[in-house]
Image (spheres, coloured by chain):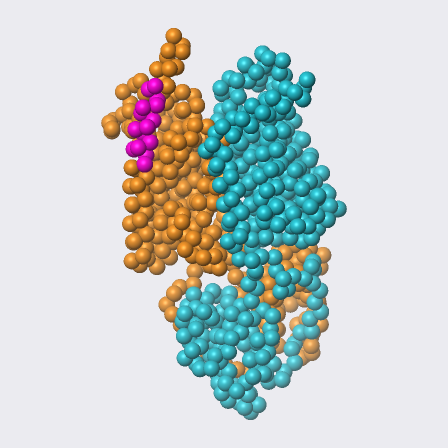
Amino acid sequence: MSAHLIMTLIKKDLKLFTRNQFYFIMTIVGLVLYIGMYFVMPKTMDETMKLGIYAPGMPLIENSLVNDEGIEAKSFSTLEELREAVLKNEYPVAIALPEDLLTRLAEGEKPIVTVYLSSSTTEEMKGAITALVKQLAFLATGQDMPLEMRSEVLGPDLLGAQIPWRDRLIPMMAIMILGTEILSLAALISTEVEQNTVSALLVTPLKLHHLFTAKAILGIGLAFIQVLLFMVVVGGLSHEILTMTLVLFIGSILVTGSGFLVASLARDMMGVTSWGMLLMIIFFIPALGGMMPGILSGWAKVLPSYHLVDAISRLSNYGASFNDISGHVLIMLGWSALFTISGVLTLRRRYR
Amino acid sequence: MNIKRVFTLLGKELLHGPRGFILTMTIATPLLITLVINLALGDLFSSAAKLAYFDESQSQLVPLLEENKQLHVFEYDSTEALKDAVSRGAADFGIIIPADFDNLVTSGDKVPVTTYIWGESLAKNRTIITATLLDLTHQLSSQSEPIILATVTLGDEESIPWSRRLMPLTVMMAVFFGGLMLPAASLIDEKLKGTLQALAVTPASLPDIFIAKGLMAALLSLVMGAIILLINQAWGESPLLLLLMLALGAIMAAEIGLILGALINEMNTLFAVWKFGGLFLFGPAIVYMFPELPQWLNYVFPTFYVTGPIMDISLGTQDNETFLQLGIAVFVILVLVFLISRLINRLAGEVPRQAIKELEATG
């Protein structure tokens, strides 16, 4: 009986959604745009600095720069070409070595090395290139390096295989797709109150818990289908399919719970928009951490969406397994339960 | 259109409108967006590599590190804290400066140091940090440099930090957000509550209502945008021109909001539009931030014709193209005015019919 009532309510809401063609088209267009944005972004990450070199007759110095993994060096045959490349900002930084550099160094003289900088070069890059050229000069004079570095790489070494921007953006796009569903569900509940259809529904055999269950199933379903579609197309499910699907499902529960919370805080549709937007932006903050690891302060990790972002990011970009993100799953479930219970209890009091 | 009635409606909206909503949409949300974007972008586009250090003694290398311009340096008070920072990407590189560092350097000995590298650190950052550390250690040892460096700057373009570059753009985004959502949500709410029909039987005409709502959104957003620019001292060298562009942006946003409000009948559709509308809004910013993206994409976004000139004006790089874009922005605004008038005409036919139906239904 209960299942039948709930199904009837879901069908009613789905019919309303699909009947509204504008809403339907916008939802699809939105999804297509996110997917399009992903594919338009660069597939690779440029992790080198461009450097032009004019070093006539000094292949050793040229080679030492060309072989440095952090430098994309290009040798120019004339000084004019080098200057032109800097002026056009094709190579924002370039060095020109005098033809008699090695001889003068051997004689203990101090030759002049010219560094050409494009005027748009940042202060950081100017300092960096100066330090680099000086070290090359020390090397050329055969002097020992003053430091003996014993280096340990922390985490997987992604040198030469950096995660491209578009993949770093996956958790953020997923949050944007899911976040909107907070507003949708809250609006769905608020509409019933504003149009007073909730009173009409409650004089039928329908109970409040049927209504809330139907809304929750619809909310979770709509959020889950959209985010799952997005992840399938952008390749987010290429690793640990089941774990990722579970994370997305729990993420959908989390936004649905948040939708209940927003609906309980808001008195009308304007309230839903205000509270919903604020919550969406707060949800969005941890997504920045997915883009730039290390920038998030400790407080941002308290936000419920942090666990969703981190789980998606680790699964899609770092090859994590269920064990690595199981803590996030539990915390998300806890937040979802807290939001849903507090939202439903408040709404229940209001409707009675 | 009756100006007196427009101002009466405007006063009503301001004094008796949904204050919580206005506060959230035109003040709290734009401020939050600006704050979040700037916090993120300041770090994202800073080209400086990040070095963490733990100094076991009072090494003279530390003041040299703090003074250098090419690195962002952060001090940690233990090896564990330093390793933690590097492993989570708060720094590209971590170095433990040993207790006898200065003595070893001045005596000309090779100093063994432990360094940690964040696995995701870019190759160029690793190169820059290593070169800088070696350079500063050479300075500390008072070793004479084997060359003289002459620096020649070519071109006349100014190097501007990303945080300053993007400030007007983020303000514009904030202005657009408030300016768009306020009239759209307000009109939809009036439709849902049936108050638009109620207003239709008063002397106030639909154009009066639309103008009042648009004016309120544009004015509030403009004021908010100006305040954010003022707080950040980002008015640039042509504040009047920048204000004009902000005003054009606020008007365009209010117009788009009015169109959405006229077309959409319930909030869920507005949220669905916002989902992809957000991309339209932030599109020029995304294209601007990633030069690898095809720049023609900008022309697809109507907001580009406002944000483009704003960027040029605030960076002092305005040229003929800037004014062409400004002209296109004005043209877009006029086209939107035309569209709104058509929509008002359509609504003018619908609203009284609905009002009559409701009156008949209530007897």
In the image, taking residue A249 as reference, residue B201 lies left or right, namely: left
Q: Quadrant of the N terminus of chain A?
A: top right
Name above or below for residue A133 compared with residue B26.
below
Residue A272 in sight in this render = no
Residue A219 in sight in this render = yes
Name above or below for residue A322 compared with residue A26.
below
Boundaries of the magenta span: B339-353
Instruction: Work out which residue is located at the far right of the displayed protein and give it.
Output: A323
Residue in front for this viewpoint, A68 or B104:
A68
Q: Position of residue B262 (x, y in %)?
A: 38, 30
What residue lies at 35% left-to-right and 15% top-to-bottom? B356
Chain letter for the part of the structure drawn in cyan: A
Name above or below for residue A171 compared with residue B218.
below
Q: Main secondary structure of the magenta part?
A: helix
Q: Position of residue B244 (x, y in %)?
A: 31, 46
What residue lies at 55% left-to-right and 63% top-to-bottom? A46
Chain B: its colour in the image is orange
Residue in front for this viewpoint, B139 or B212:
B212
In the image, taking residue B242 as reference, residue B98 lies left or right, namely: right
